[in-house]
């Protein structure tokens, strides 16, 4: 009789231990599932961009966010304004998705995130456009893409970050007419807005030649309309004097005249072919 009681107690004890073990496993699984779900949720936050601080830092609904994988110029450096302006164009006053990597915050308490607008990785786009460099010590998910994007931008001298390459290229051009002998100041196309009402020579690369329905020609420098930083304008009644306007497209040129402002952009009106010259590459 005593043996039967001992066996029953033993079986109940084993049953209780087994049941407790199963409960522990179940609770552990549920906790893991919940935590994993929170991690997935938190790795893809959404928010509204209320301010752009600089080319790699924004404020999203009161939280400061540092764009992962990139480094843009600080204030006082060459590409600060252009990178900040471009980031404003892309995300300011827009809803974005914030994707987290392994590290949540930097030493300053800023959230480290990839910023997505629809299906576009904004961080990566800024590197592709030559407005920021790759900085991948905390960016694990897309490290190879950032490095590849920077290499391509650097090789092709794309954007402000690699403008030194472009400036070096400009120095290798010979100018037969529009040169220092004229005694005029020579300014870069994107600096022309700082010389309004001055008679100068403007130098830059023509990104686009556009002829309107009214037969007016617009030679847009550095970037196509509406992102050009300077335009040489030829009105229709002067157009016959200029031959093969498309030959200017893609070339580094100089134009001479008085700089005027039109809708916030600098421009020079060309009335004579002697006001424009294509640079001759010196090898």
Image (spheres, rainbow, N blue to C red):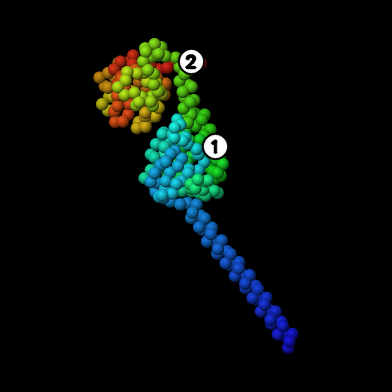
Q: Which mark is residue 282?
A: 2
- The residue furthest bottom is 1
Residue depicted at 32% across the width and 20% down the height: 198
Residue depicted at 50% across the width and 39% down the height: 70
- The residue furthest right is 3
Identify the element where label 2 is drawn.
loop
Q: Give the residue at mark 1.
A: 147
Instruction: Give the spatial CA distance, label 1 vs label 2.
Output: 32 Å
Q: Earlier in the sequence, mark 1 or mark 2?
A: 1
Residue depicted at 32% across the width and 18% down the height: 199
From the viewer's perspective, is 76 left or right of 3? left
Q: Residues within 10 Å of mark 1 (few under 14, many from 20)?
A: some
Q: Which mark is residue 34?
A: none
Residue 28 placement (x, y as % from top left): 58, 64
Q: Is residue 80 above or below residue 211?
A: below
Residue 281 placement (x, y as % from top left): 46, 17
Report if residue 235 is visible in the image. Answer: yes
Identify the element where label 1 is drawn.
helix
């Amino acid at each position: 009789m005593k043996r039967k009681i001992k066996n029953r107690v033993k079986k109940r004890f084993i049953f209780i231990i087994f049941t407790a073990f199963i409960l522990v496993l179940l609770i552990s699984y549920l906790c893991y599932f919940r935590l994993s779900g929170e991690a997935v949720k938190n790795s893809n936050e959404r928010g509204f961009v209320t301010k752009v601080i600089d080319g790699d830092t924004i404020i999203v609904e009161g939280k400061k966010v540092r764009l992962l994988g990139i480094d843009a110029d600080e204030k006082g450096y060459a590409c600060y304004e252009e990178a900040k302006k471009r980031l404003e164009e892309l995300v300011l006053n827009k809803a974005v998705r914030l994707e987290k990597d392994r590290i949540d915050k930097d030493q300053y308490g800023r959230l480290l995130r990839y910023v997505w607008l629809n299906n576009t990785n904004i961080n990566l786009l800024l590197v592709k456009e030559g407005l920021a460099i790759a900085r991948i010590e905390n960016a694990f998910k897309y490290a190879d893409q950032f490095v590849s994007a920077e290499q391509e931008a650097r090789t092709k001298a794309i954007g402000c970050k690699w403008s030194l390459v472009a400036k070096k290229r400009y120095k290798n051009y010979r100018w037969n007419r529009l040169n220092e002998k004229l005694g005029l100041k020579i300014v870069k196309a994107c600096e022309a807005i700082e010389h309004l009402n001055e008679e100068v020579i403007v130098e830059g690369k023509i990104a686009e030649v556009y002829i309107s329905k009214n037969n007016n020609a617009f030679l847009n420098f550095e970037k196509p309309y509406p992102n050009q930083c300077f335009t040489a304008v030829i009105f229709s009644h002067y157009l016959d004097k200029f031959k093969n306007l498309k030959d200017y497209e893609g070339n580094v040129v100089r134009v001479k005249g008085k700089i005027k402002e039109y809708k916030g952009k600098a421009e020079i009106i060309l009335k004579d072919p002697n006001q424009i010259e294509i640079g001759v590459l010196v090898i």
